Image (spheres, rainbow, N blue to C red):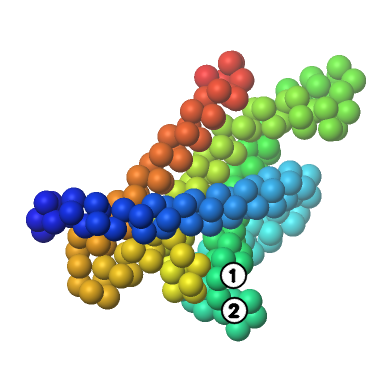
Amino acid sequence: MDWGDFIDTVRDDWPEILIAVQEHLYLSFISILIGILISVPAGIIISRLKKIAEFVIGITAVFQTIPSLALFGFLLPVLGIGTTPAIIALTVYALLPILRNTYTGIIGVDESLIQAGKGMGMTSNQILWKIELPLALPIIMAGIRTATVLTIGVATLATFIAAGGLGDIIYRGLSTINNELVLAGAIPAALLAILFDAILRGIEKMVTPKGLK
């Protein structure tokens, strides 16, 4: 491959690439946000109901094993094409890492610390917010980082249900046997994953209790 041709391709198709990046960010960000809003509370709940924890985590694991294109295909007859089925599918893929890490992080908190909180007269909610969640936060953030990288990667397949994103650029390149165009879509997707992982790692360091750093 000629890198000069690649640079020319990026320059010529820059407006389309920029739009695709914006669409990709929208799909990924909304999906991750919904995944967090579902998985973190669910992880807290199953940490209190350990008898159903493995069942709930198992269900989300089953969804994770469904091939990405197949999941998009299952949603087409119900929701049609566009961003809605894409966001639902991407959210499903984001659930497992966040849910499992939230559960693992909370149940991994030292029982002596919880008992100390109870001895100080803390309520269950106070123990959750002041002891369990702060101590579990590094593990929860690791799950969110994993889900983010996974979601950004899978979002390239949203092109097959007309949801846009960098997958459009990649598919155009594959259709025309244009390796430069494929890279013009693949490289920004990889850079987005690396960038968001770095941002989340920085946030993780900022919010982690000093005693755990």
Whether residue 111 is visible: no
Dot 1 lies on which element? helix
Dot 2 lies on which element? loop
Dot 2 or dot 1: first in sequence order is 2
Tell me if residue 190 comes above or below residue 137 in the rendering: below
Give the image location of residue 206, x and y in percent. 55, 23
Q: Residue at x 33, y 70 (%)?
A: 171
Label 1: few (<14), some (14–19) or many (≥20) C-alpha neighbours in 10 Å: many
User: Decide: marks 2, 1 in contact (CB < 8 A)?
Assistant: yes
Tell me if residue 77 comes above or below residue 117 in the rendering: below
Report the label total: 2
Give the image location of residue 148, x and y in percent. 50, 48
Give the image location of residue 119, x and y in percent. 86, 19
Q: Is residue 205 left or right of residue 3?
A: right
Spot the residue most to the bottom. Answer: 77
User: Which numbered marker is on residue 80?
Assistant: 2
Viewer-nearest residue: 98 or 81 = 81
Q: Residue at x 41, y 46 (%)?
A: 193
In the picture, residue 85 is in which quadrant? bottom right
Q: Is residue 66 left or right of residue 4?
A: right
Q: Is residue 80 left or right of residue 22?
A: right
Tell me if residue 76 comes above or below residue 190 in the rendering: below
Q: Is residue 112 left or right of residue 84?
A: right
Q: CA distance from mark 2 to mark 1?
A: 7 Å
Tell me if residue 196 comes above or below residue 25 in the rendering: above
Residue tagged 1: 85
Kind of residue at badge 1: Pro
